[in-house]
Image (cartoon, helix red, strand yellow):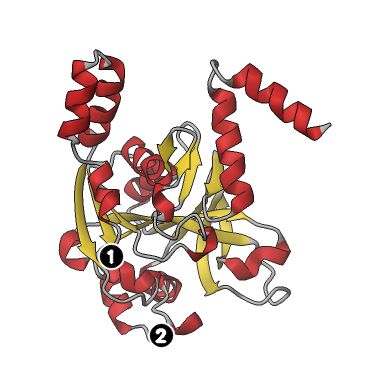
């Protein structure tokens, strides 16, 4: 199993990020000095991904534009002698091959993935949600790709969440077969608090065979009347087995305001030019 393609659904309305996302896609909201979706794509590149398939809608072409050349801006920077900044924006345009397909109706994550079927064809591929990113060496999607290629099995990424928040995620059940790796025995989408023992939550990272499309085409609308990817994953796991890997690194959900603001502070503190003044300001505000 060789993974060279990732599907990133970005067609949602971003209601958790309103009013900031009223006219700007939530995936394009800045975290420190880059939009959220660039962190997602950079994580994919670290995992060896070469082709990115955005599942988008008619109002989100700015996401694709971000990964294209901007000749007018490049000309201004070149004439101004701002060569370092010129290189930075050209590197964004050259970092990966971008493709896109539209999700014409908002029918859930499973439906969004199904929209990419003709782009993926018969390849094994990765899926990443577009507003959730992970920072850390060898963390995130890279862990899933390594395990999937080594074991030749579907893999989902999980993290432990507090028991009172299991109703926000797809929850995995399984037996730990090696440190941080679980053999999946079942899963459920957004269970009621107190109804499940597991706290292993799927957090937007998957490596799957193209057979997932057959399962997506068979599932009926589930939680919220949508085509749930979790339902198709459960069917796939029952048919051929599946692994879950506990992801390392630091995860930020850009649709959660506390996570979004924390990500900005965390990355700002990594910048040696901003660190001291930012720390001083934060300490002053906390007094």
Residue 122 in view: no
Q: Which residue occupies 28% across, 55% down?
A: 125
Q: CA distance from mark 1 to mark 2?
A: 21 Å
Q: Residue at x 52, y 72 (%)?
A: 186
Marks counted in the figure total 2
How far across and down, in percent of the image, does residue 146 sit?
37, 43
Nearer-the-camera pick, 256 or 117: 256
Quadrant (top left, top right, bottom left, bottom right) of the C terminus: top right
Q: Label 1 belongs to which residue?
A: 57
Residue 8 to residue 118: above or below: above
Is 56 positioned to the left or the right of 274 in the image?
left
Q: Residues within 10 Å of mark 2 (few under 14, many from 20)?
A: some
Residue 4, position as x, y percentages in the image = 24, 46
- The quadrant holding residue 11 is bottom left
Labelled disc at residue 22: none
Report the residue marked by disc 2.
221
- Coordinates of residue 168 in the picture (x, y in percent): 59, 67
- Give the vertical position of 114 relative to 95 (above or below): below
């Amino acid at each position: 199993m060789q993974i060279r393609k990732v599907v990133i659904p970005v067609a949602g309305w971003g209601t958790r990020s309103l009013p900031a996302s009223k006219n700007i896609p939530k995936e394009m909201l800045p975290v420190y000095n880059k939009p959220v979706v660039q962190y997602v794509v950079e994580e994919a590149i670290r995992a060896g991904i070469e082709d990115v398939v955005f599942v988008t809608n008619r109002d989100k072409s700015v996401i694709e534009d971000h990964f294209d050349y901007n000749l007018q801006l490049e000309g201004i920077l070149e004439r101004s002698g701002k060569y370092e900044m010129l290189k930075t924006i050209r590197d964004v345009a050259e970092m990966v091959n971008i493709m896109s397909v539209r999700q014409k109706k908002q029918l859930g994550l499973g439906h969004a993935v199904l929209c990419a079927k003709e782009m993926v064809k018969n390849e094994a591929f990765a899926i990443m949600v577009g507003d959730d990113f992970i920072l850390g060496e060898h963390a995130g999607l890279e862990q899933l790709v390594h395990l999937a290629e080594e074991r030749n099995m579907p893999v989902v990424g999980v993290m432990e969440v507090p028991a009172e928040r299991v109703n926000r995620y797809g929850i995995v059940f399984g037996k730990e077969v090696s440190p941080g790796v679980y053999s999946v025995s079942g899963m459920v989408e957004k269970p009621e608090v107190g109804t499940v023992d597991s706290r292993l939550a799927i957090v937007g990272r998957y490596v799957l065979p193209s057979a997932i499309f057959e399962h997506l085409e068979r599932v009926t609308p589930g939680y919220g009347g949508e085509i749930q990817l979790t339902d198709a994953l459960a069917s796939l796991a029952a048919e051929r087995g599946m692994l879950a890997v506990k992801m390392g690194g630091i995860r930020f959900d850009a649709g959660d305001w506390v996570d979004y603001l924390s990500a900005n502070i965390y990355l700002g503190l990594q910048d040696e030019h901003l660190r001291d003044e930012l720390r001083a300001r934060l300490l002053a505000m906390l007094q």
